[in-house]
Image: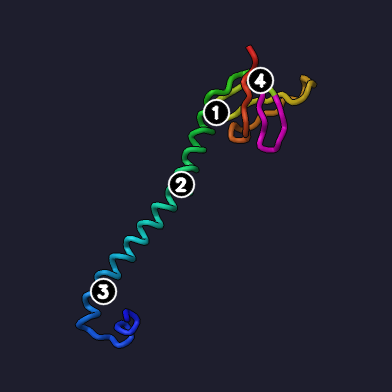
Amino acid sequence: MDLFILLTGDASTNAGMTGGLGFSYIISIVLMLAIFYFLMIKPQKKEQKRVEAMLADMEVGDVVVTTSGFYGVLIDITEEDVIVEFGSNKNCRIPMRKSAIAQVEKADK
């Protein structure tokens, strides 16, 4: 019946439906935005806070895993960079950005 009214263009019955259709479109857009926020944006912000907290809690001597998969020990930490010692060879020390660290395991004390 609604399709017939829309096709015939009967102004008397169609005028009342236009407000209802507009309102349902607005509700569906708001609902899609809310779903998008809770499924995409909120988890990403939560993960970003976790990574920032992990990087802030790093200490010299912690074992780290880089984003490329290398295991190493933190030797020095500066504001944006770290120096990581790889392997048992004490001559293999590489400076890198903190953002290159994917995981931190606390040193046993």
Placement of 46 over or under 76, stated as above or below = below
The kind of residue tagged 2 is: Ile
User: Who comes first in sequence, dot 2 or dot 1?
Assistant: 2
Measure how far apart labels 1 and 3 are at the Cα level: 53 Å
* Residues packed near mark 3 inside 10 Å, few (<14), some (14 to 19) or many (20 plus): few
Q: Position of residue 33 (x, y in %)?
A: 40, 55
User: Who comes first in sequence, dot 4 or dot 1?
Assistant: 1
Q: Which mark is residue 75?
A: 4
User: In the picture, residue 5 is in which quadrant?
Assistant: bottom left
Measure how far apart labels 4 and 1 are at the Cα level: 17 Å
- Residue that label 2 marks: 41
* Residues packed near mark 1 inside 10 Å, few (<14), some (14 to 19) or many (20 plus): some
State yes or no: residue 71 in magenta: yes
Q: Position of residue 87 (x, y in %)?
A: 77, 24
* Residues packed near mark 2 inside 10 Å, few (<14), some (14 to 19) or many (20 plus): few
The quadrant the C terminus occupies is top right
Q: Position of residue 10 (x, y in %)?
A: 24, 86
- Residue visible at 70% across and 38% down in the picture: 68
Measure how far apart labels 2 and 1 are at the Cα level: 20 Å
Placement of 30 over or under 16, stated as above or below = above
Q: SS of the residue at dot 4?
A: strand
Q: Of 66 and 24, which appears nearest the observer? A: 24
Q: Which residues are magenta?
A: 63-72
